[in-house]
Amino acid sequence: MTLTTRFAPSPTGPLHLGHAYSALLAYDLAQAAGGTFLLRIEDIDLSRARPHWEAQIYEDLAWLGIDWPEPVMRQSDRMESYRTALDDLWARGLLYACACNRRDIAAATSAPQEGAEPVYGPDGIIYPGTCREAGHPRSAGALRLNMAKALKKLDIAPLSFVESGCGPNHETGQITTSLDQLIATVGDVVLARRDMGTSYHLSVVLDDAAQGVTLVPRGADLFEATYIHVVLQGLLDLPKPIYHHHRLIRDDDGKRLAKRDDARAIALYRENGATPEDIRTMVGL
Ligand code: GLU
């Protein structure tokens, strides 16, 4: 099997050093194995995605010395596939419509026991299940995965994936989690946001499979989300790639870089005379 890696940025701001690290690592891993590096534009959030950021991504990556096969997959062209997967999960009774807003969820998680802290998972507060049995019509709101039902259907325990990089707590190799742990620490995640008709989790899993990605290099901040991805791969009968989480590039104060950190934007380094080699040195490659 040939190795296929990918870099999947969202065109919602300038690429910074953290993105450069991720992209170069994915590219180098593919090159070293005689494999393929793919680029995918994750533009499902149409309220934030902008064509000029997408153009800048192509420019920055080419400047870094990265090339990729055309055409580039763009998530905004893939809504039909996401919809088909949701139809399938809905028909199997694994989804429910959730009409809660953030405030409802915060209220439901803090009310019962005074002082009890809400539990946070990869997507924020673990959903308390308010709408799980409400029987709302599909159009009533976001679509959530009924995690307990999904895991029962999957009938794989423990759930596992192979990590060839390293999670935030140095997790590597065969990574496993118990189903109870998953229900408690991930819960009923949203698979289709009301405003998007899909979600990062659903789209990323379907797209990695559609593109034949065999190795997923990405930041360690997405390590926990991988459990959700593995559940979805099982439910949708998709191949499971190997994951390669990498350390996050931090600013001088130790904070991880975000899109708003324009000071670390590749384009700015380039304007100020840095070479692609300088960028490689800065990120430790
Ligand atoms: N689109 C995501 C981002 O820009 C990356 C998703 C992934 O690599 O799985 O952060």
Image: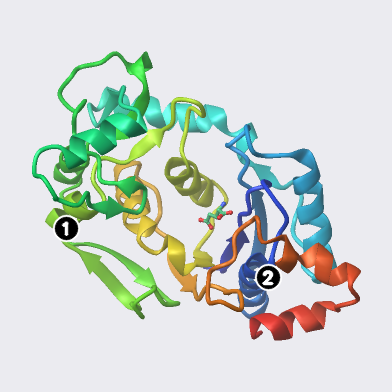
Q: Is residue 11 above or below residue 32?
A: above
Q: Farthest residue toward the left? A: 113
Label 1 crowd bin: few (<14), some (14–19), many (20+), radius 10 Å? few
Image quarter (top left, top right, bottom left or bottom right) of the C terminus: bottom right
Query: What residue do we see at 67% from left, 39% from top?
Result: 49
Marks 1 and 2, the one that precedes in the sequence: 2
**Residue 146 horizontal/vertical position (percent):** 22, 36
In the foreground, 170 or 118: 118
In the foreground, 230 or 199: 199
- Depth check, mark 1 against mark 2: the one in front is 2
**Residue 111 horizontal/vertical position (percent):** 15, 37
Query: What residue do we see at 50% from left, 76% from top?
Result: 247
Query: What residue do we see at 22% from left, 26% from top?
Result: 93
The residue under label 1 is 181
Kind of element beneath mark 1: helix
The residue under label 2 is 17
**Residue 168 horizontal/vertical position (percent):** 39, 73
Looking at the image, residue 98 sits to the left or right of residue 14; the answer is: left
Kind of element beneath mark 2: helix
Query: What residue do we see at 73% from left, 39% from top?
Result: 50
